[in-house]
Image (tube, rainbow, N blue to C red):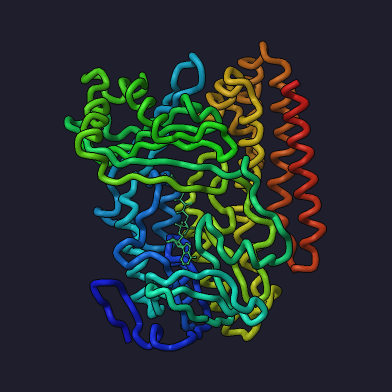
Amino acid sequence: MTLITAAGILFPTMVRQNSSNADVIVVGGGTAGCVAATVAARAGVSVLLIESRTAEDVGRKACGGALSADAVQVVSEIVGPLTGAEIAGTITSGLLGLPGDSPAVELDEPGVILNRPVLGQRLFSDALESGATLMTGHTCVGWSDRHNCTVHIRRPDGTETDATGLVIVDATGFRSVLTKAAGPTHPDAPKRSEIGIGYFEVLPLAKDLDRPDRAVVQIAPEGACDGYAWVFPMGSRLVNAGIGASLAAEDRSLKKHLRSYLDGSDLIVAHAPQTGGGDVTTAVENRHRAGSLSSGSGMIPLRRPLAGLVGDGFLSAGDAACQANPLHGGGIAPSIIAGSVAGRVAAAAVRRGDCSAAGLWEYGVETMRVLGAPHASQDLIRRLLSGLTPDDMAFVAGEMASAGRAFRSLYSSSPGLRAREILGTIGRAARRPALLKLLFESGHHVSAIHRLYRNYPESPDRLGTWFGRVEFAVRSFDRLVQGGRG
Ligand SMILES: Cc1cc2nc3c(=O)[nH]c(=O)nc-3n(C[C@H](O)[C@H](O)[C@H](O)COP(=O)(O)OP(=O)(O)OC[C@H]3O[C@@H](n4cnc5c(N)ncnc54)[C@H](O)[C@@H]3O)c2cc1C
């Protein structure tokens, strides 16, 4: 029986006991966790969802809220259509600012800008309505007994308790509280250079935006030479503006750099040509006066997914498993996809009575095929881009961004490379022979790692060999990029 209180959504029986049991315990009530809990509960197994935030704060996380049209479709198929209040802005195109003096590129990239907290609250309600037991304000502090799938939880009053499940799903986001300590099969922790840090603000505008349907992204703005800044319209009077950089960057004063980007960017002028950029300038002034509506920073893994996503009675999903897109950090759709597969596989394993790593293995196979393969390819492309000079990076990013151009074909693992388009890129890169050679050679590596992830081992005993091949592929690629850089 459910009790909804002002302080949160609690099951009184749960908080009174010294320990809790459920078939599936999902730790973390973000996008991955809520979806995993909902899918598993709907499949008829008992589910406990543990979330450290209060019920009111679920969904409030640092995020740009951008979803491409493709991602909207995938997400809608899993969680149902996105409703009016969840969509803050509708985007028909993008403007990509390139490093240096290169002109900005228009992108034909429709999508939406989400009101992230509203979506988070809806997914949380879905979990509740599906019959999952929700513990808000409860923080999982780690494993109590890994072998017995028992996790240790701190209650809001500071007292502690345990919860035991047949399957534990770690959906704690970047913190990956349990994944870090689970050692499912392989330690494969992200390096600092594979972690992004982002800062965002939701800024009110004094005047209407001229182009509320256009998202602006600036690659390598000052202060984030290996990252990007964004201005995403949430209607005509509000923007989600932010900046992201590598955690390995020396200067990580992102708030300062976002301010200087907003104050000085030509792109913002282009964003609101009739007001000469006044909209966002006014927004910045507003912020100085009244403060932004919300702001915050957060970290995001920018790399291929962890090799070992599954252990005995254990699955890792979403940012905890490094399943966000390594090129731009988009992780909402991937975490929803992964959460949905995790919930389905966990419930099926419980019903079959086999929650061993082998019984849960299909989670890894399926998510690696759908997310791992493209993300492993994009991880290599990110590594390539971060090794280029600003001028070469501008060229490559421009080629990548221009719809239908060769770069997409060159780096696509799908058949049907369009020879004419490839020749087009060759023509445009004729004055950059070293870059051209690097692009061709890296194209081979990108396709190879895509195949490797699509052929994720069918059973846990073959993971070691597979992981060795992945490490070799990534090391070889890094050497290629370093060599190509000269
Ligand atoms: C600055 C920034 C901008 C971004 N912009 C975009 C964007 O525009 N588009 C996009 O698609 N993606 C974006 N992302 C990425 C996206 O937000 C994440 O990939 C996505 O939210 C991952 O979902 P998740 O469920 O795995 O983790 P999260 O959403 O982080 O959820 C984890 C949940 O676990 C809870 N938790 C953590 N530790 C514990 C614990 N010990 N015990 C209990 N609960 C715990 C947290 O409170 C949280 O609710 C952005 C990320 C950042 C940082």
Residue 173 appears at what percent x and percent y? 50, 58
What is the quadrant of residue 123 in the picture? bottom left
Q: Identify whether 310 is placed above or below 22.
A: above
Front in this rendered view, residue 215 or 306: 306
Q: Identify whether 6 is placed above or below 228.
A: below
What is the quadrant of residue 352 in the picture? bottom right
Q: Is residue 356 left or right of residue 13?
A: right
Residue 364 seen in this snapshot? yes
Q: Is residue 398 left or right of residue 258?
A: right
Residue 402 seen in this snapshot? no
What is the quadrant of residue 110 in the picture? top left
Q: Residue furthest front?
A: 158
Q: Identify whether 444 is placed above or below 118.
A: above
Residue 70 appears at what percent x and percent y? 45, 47
Residue drawn at 48 percent across, 46 percent down: 330
Residue 7 appears at what percent x and percent y? 27, 72
Front in this rendered view, residue 60 or 270: 60
Which quarter is ligand 1 in? Answer: bottom left
Residue drawn at 25 percent across, 44 percent down: 293
The quadrant of the image that shows the C terminus is top right
Residue drawn at 58 percent across, 17 percent down: 391
The quadrant of the image that shows the N terminus is bottom left
Residue drawn at 57 percent across, 72 percent down: 345
Residue 319 appears at what percent x and percent y? 53, 55
Number of labels in the image equals 0
Q: Residue furthest top?
A: 431
